[in-house]
Image (cartoon, rainbow, N blue to C red):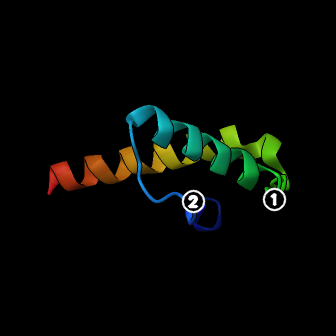
Amino acid sequence: MRGLTRNVTRWRSGDMIARWTALGVLHAEQHFRRIRSYRYLPLLARALHHDGAKIDQTEAAA
């Protein structure tokens, strides 16, 4: 992002900031890689939520 915005000398409005930010995200998106086993992410989220709930219950009991 820094390389894309280095020539901007004055940020005139929120719209301009949003446009440059969107451009930076689109540029970065080209370098993203797919996460291996991405199909299992919902399972991981449920497990983390379940473990977090266990920890909350333990702290509340103490």
Q: Toward which corner of the image does residue 39 lie, by quadrant?
A: top right
Judging depth in this view, the residue of 7 and 1 nearest the camera is: 7
Residue at the image point whose x is 46% and y is 59% from the top: 9
Residue 37 coordinates in the image, percent (x, y): 84, 51
For image coordinates 83% across by 57% down, the residue present is 33
Which residue is disc 2 drawn over? Answer: 5
Residue ID for mark 1: 31
Name which residue lies at 81% across and 59% down.
31
Q: Nearer the viewer, residue 34 or 7?
A: 7
- Residue 10 numbered tag: none
Comparing 48 with 29, the one in front is 29
Please provide percent x and percent y for residue 42. Answer: 67, 38
Q: Residue furthest top?
A: 15
Q: Quadrant of the N terminus?
A: bottom right
- Secondary structure state at the residue bearing disc 1: loop
Disc 2 element: helix
